[in-house]
Amino acid sequence: MPPETLTALQEIAATNQWSALAPEITLGVAALLLLALELALPKRLVAVAVPRVAFLGLAAALALVFKDWAAPLFGPELFGGLVRQTTDSQIMRVFFLVASALVAFIATVVLPKHKVPRVEFFHVLLVATGALMLLPQSNHFVQLFVALETVTVALYILVAYFRTSPFSLEAGLKYLVMGSLSSALLLFGIVLLYGVAGNPLLAGHTAQAMNFGELAAFVRLNPEHPLVVVGAALVLSGIAFKIGAVPFQIWVPDVYQGAPTPVTAFLAVSSKAAGFALLLVLVRGPFQALAHVTIPLLSTFAALSLLFGNLAALGQRNVKRLMGLSGVSHAGFLLVGVVAAIAREDAVSWAPAAVYFYLFTYLIGAMATFGVMAHVSVGDDADQDFRHYAGLARRSPLLGAVLACGVGSLAGIPPLAGFIGKLLIFVAAFQAHQWTLLGVAIVAVVISIYYYFGWVRAAFYDQGSESDRNVAPIHLGVAAGATLVALALAAVLLGLYQGPLGQWIATR
């Protein structure tokens, strides 16, 4: 082996700091432990032990993230340039761990109602969570693609997890087809960028264009090159599939309805957040010099998502489809924040923090709502209509109150957390001089109030049919009740006082 090659390999090996990925490794070990427990324990103990081990794995990973919050590893590229850790990536690691813990909680409510394997569900959930945590740390397209496809394959499995349900199988097939299309777009865009950056006839050409830093330097010298523009547009379009933005949202209502409720929650919160974490990494990194492309493209996605998501949700009575279409609208709000972050980066430097804050408020509101849906659902998980919520506040005052807080936060009603999240996005758009997007976003909020409060009205004011009035009260376990109360309180308290979370994100 030539000395220079050996030296280069030694330099790469020196950057392999495995302790930096301790949380992800912990999740991988916990996922393998779940499979071992299924083999070692009697079946009657597996159902009890598996969720607890999953929660312990998530808690241990969360503790490791906080332990290394100010680690000196931040900044330098790790693993030969594949990984770069920042405070932003740490925030998203916390987000994904908290979201997965709540998904696991919802799963403990839903899975016992169906005769499906439990070990495999929590195993796949932990693996997907580890891959999600790697996405915002990506500094290389190979790392990004492998982590993203790991999450996507896991979701293929989870969406079709209820194998006896035609809705779940149909949703799995549709997600497979559309997910494959989005992966093809993303990969084609990456290939175009890699190819054009390696052209020796162009200024700044490099053979390391998969690295975000190297690609950013090349793009700065060739921002108008057609292949650079098309490649970036294809990459952003591939990510737009993941977040469910228009015109790549066609899969959302059917998949949200057919997937098991905990998987719908995982798609709505974690998958969407991963897409926006990637968008912020790309538009402020390798695509920073392409504002003339990213701003009009993402602005179009945002406006169309806000209008389509809210208008399509107006006629929906199936609550899972409603959550899917309203999720398209939330993607639009978040895209407004991303556009503000790149339109006037000097004047609105805090816009990324507004996006992160919105993601946390969305997590709280969505998980509170899905937690209620998990307790209300009976029989076919895909068939949840407004009529099933008639008189919910009478049958279970706690679930009615949590639903009101969750849905109210999603609608952006003061003094709930969602109101502050939307307000910050609006202020960022105003300071970035995105007047059109701001106007569309305000109209979208007004429209959303109608369908969100149609759901609340069903829970508090509709009496339902005679059969509905005879339904027995819904009883919650202590842990389930405490979790839902905590989410409702978080929605209220974060709307009144943003101090801890706001300062934590703003000091990123």
Image (cartoon, rainbow, N blue to C red):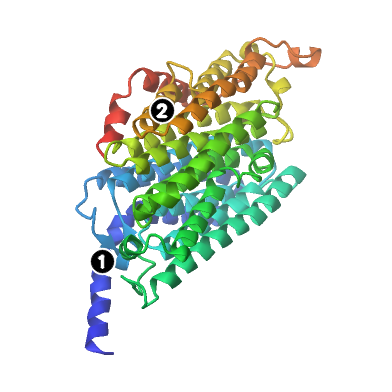
The span from disc 2 to disc 1 (Cα, nearest Å) is: 41 Å
Q: In this rendering, does residue 353 appear at all?
A: yes
Q: Which mark is residue 157?
A: none
Q: Nearer the viewer, residue 299 or 358?
A: 299
Q: Nearer the viewer, residue 397 or 202?
A: 202
Q: In this figure, which residue is indicated by the disc labeled 2?
A: 426
Which quadrant of the rendered structure holds the C terminus? top left
| Residue 411 picture location, percent across and down | 52, 23
**Element on which disc 1 rests:** loop
Q: Nearer the viewer, residue 98 or 499?
A: 499
Q: Image check: 3 left or right of 405?
A: left
251, above or below 368, in the image = below
Closer to viewer: mark 2 or mark 1? 2
Question: Does the CB distance between marks 2 and 1 fall below 8 Å?
Answer: no
Q: Image check: 356 left or right of 449?
A: left
Which sits earlier in the primary sequence, circle 2 or circle 1? 1
Residue at image position (74%, 43%) is 167
Q: Give, as a three-letter code, the residue at label 2.
A: Phe
Residue at image position (59%, 32%) is 307
Badge 2 crowding class, 10 Å Cα cut-off, few under 14, some 14 to 19, many 20 or more, is many
Q: In this figure, which residue is indicated by the disc labeled 1?
A: 15
Q: Image check: 335 left or right of 72?
A: right
Residue at image position (34%, 42%) is 91
Q: Give, as a three-letter code, the residue at label 1.
A: Thr
Badge 1 crowding class, 10 Å Cα cut-off, few under 14, some 14 to 19, many 20 or more, is some
